[in-house]
Amino acid sequence: MALKIRLARGGAKKRPFYRIVVADAGAPRDGRFLERVGQYDPFLPHDNPGRIQFDEARVKHWLGNGAQPTERVQRFLAAKGIGTFTQPVRPQKSAPKKKAQERSAAAAKAAEAAAGEA
């Protein structure tokens, strides 16, 4: 059973409030979870200590038992000094492909040559 430490959304429409929970990876986002270990209120200011609250001892316990935090929770934990956050490598699907890059490089070289002659 793969465990995740993730956010479960609560609150009203357009007023989100999140619980930090330990859940089975296959469980629904707002559904069944094993333990609630904290909370996150995105409407509080960034410097407010009540914005992100969690039980560090329980989080460390679950991390020791193999639970994997999601990216957002990993950021929260790194901010509190538990673990580190490394920016994930994301594929650049929107980047121009090889031939388009070659064409733009050739056009830039031609424009540079034309500017040098003038």
Image: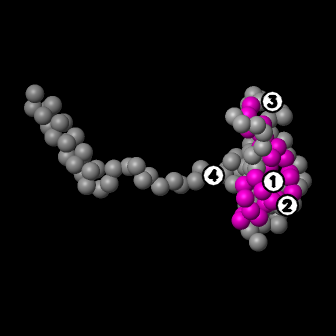
- In which quadrant is the N terminus drawn? bottom right
Percent coordinates x, y for residue 14 in the rendering: 69, 34
Q: Which is in the foreground here, disc 1 or disc 4?
A: 1
> Which amino acid does the dot numbered 2 rest on?
Leu
Q: Are marks 3 and 4 in contact (CB under 8 Å)?
A: no
Distance Cα–Cα, label 3 vs label 4: 24 Å
Residue at x 84% of width, y 34% of height: 50
Whether residues under marks 2 and 1 lie with C-beta atoms below 8 angstroms apart, the answer is yes
Query: Distance of mark 3 from mark 2, alpha carbons?
Result: 28 Å
In the picture, the disc for residue 21 is 1
Alpha-carbon span between mark 1 and mark 4: 21 Å
Q: Is residue 97 above or below residue 40?
A: below
* Three-letter residue code for mark 1: Val
Q: Is residue 15 above or below residue 65?
A: above
Q: Nearer the viewer, mark 1 or mark 3?
A: 1
Q: In the displayed image of the protein, which residue is found farthest to the left?
A: 117
Q: CA distance from mark 2 to mark 1?
A: 7 Å
Task: Please tell me whether residue 36 belongs to the stretch shown in magenta.
Answer: yes
Left or right: 107, with 10 as reference point:
left
Report whether residue 62 is seen: yes
Q: Going 10% across and 27% down the picture, which residue do you hit?
A: 118
- Residue indicated by mark 4: 86
Q: Which residues are magenta?
A: 15-43
